[in-house]
Amino acid sequence: MSKMILVVDDKREIRFLLNQYLTQEGFRVAEAADGQEALYIARQERPDLIILDLMMPNMGGYEFMRVYGKDADTPIIILTAKLEESEKVLGLELGADDYVTKPFSMRELTARVRAVLRRLEKQQNGDEPLLRVADITLDKTMRQVTVDGNAIDLTPSEFDLLAVFMGNPGRVFSRSELLDYLQGDAYEGYERTIDVHIRNLRSKIEEDTRNPRYIETVYGVGYRLKR
């Protein structure tokens, strides 16, 4: 399942733009107009990451972090129009993982979101050098892959793609997200290279590439590894 992002901002147009853009990038999105609403939604939905404005009515971003930080250790990216270093430091001390200053680029914010989630996944999966899904085994230490006991020779990019999928079986990845995992930054115009890597990977691990057993195309979004 794709990651859920909670967007918290009192400006409807910002929530709308972020919802539209992040949804196109393969994320699920929930919205809240202030800290109190965000607190209720976060406790119900348990988002994977929160994009949080600081200056809001009813409950501002700082207070939200103080309260919700007692419930869950969810990554937070702050949206702020303030430039004072003390404001940024306070946000980071309260548990924020990153901050973006308004006005911001949608592409930059999305890259920050992916970077934070990627760091979290590396921490969660860092002690799992051996991955097994169905009859595929991937050994990160030895850089070896077997399918039904047969060794498979993969290129570095194919190996890294398979490791991403196997570390998150069932999760849908957009092309730009997969490209970001491979090279650190997503560059427009090159996302279709993922299709080439996927086609080559399928030719090595699938018995029938026209009816793939492992790597499934999710039309309009990207790819996922079947559980």
Image (tube, helix red, strand yellow):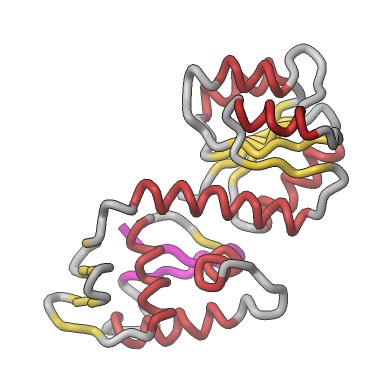
| Quadrant of the snapshot with the C terminus | bottom left
Which of the pair 72/194 is nearer the observer?
Answer: 72
Q: In the visual, does 12 lie left or right of 115?
A: right
In the rendered image, residue 223 lying in the magenta stretch gets the answer yes
Task: State the image coordinates of residue 172 (x, y, percent, origin top left).
Answer: 48, 58
Residue located at (56% from left, 48% from top): 116
Q: Is residue 62 left or right of residue 152?
A: right
Q: Residue at x 60, y 56 (%)?
A: 26
Residue at x 82% of width, y 49% of height = 104
Counting from the top left corner in percent of width and height, residue 179 is at: 56, 71
**Which quadrant of the figure has residue 60?**
top right
For the magenta stretch, what is the residue range? 214-227
Residue at the image position 78 percent from the left and 38 percent from the top: 15
Percent position (x, y) of residue 62? 69, 21
Q: Nearer the viewer, residue 29 or 155?
A: 155
* Residue closest to the far top: 58
Instruction: Identify which residue, 95 or 209, lies in the foreground.
Output: 95
Can you say whether 107 is above or below 41 in the image? below
Number of marks in the rendered image: 0
Closest to the observer, 224 or 96: 96
Q: Is residue 218 magenta?
A: yes
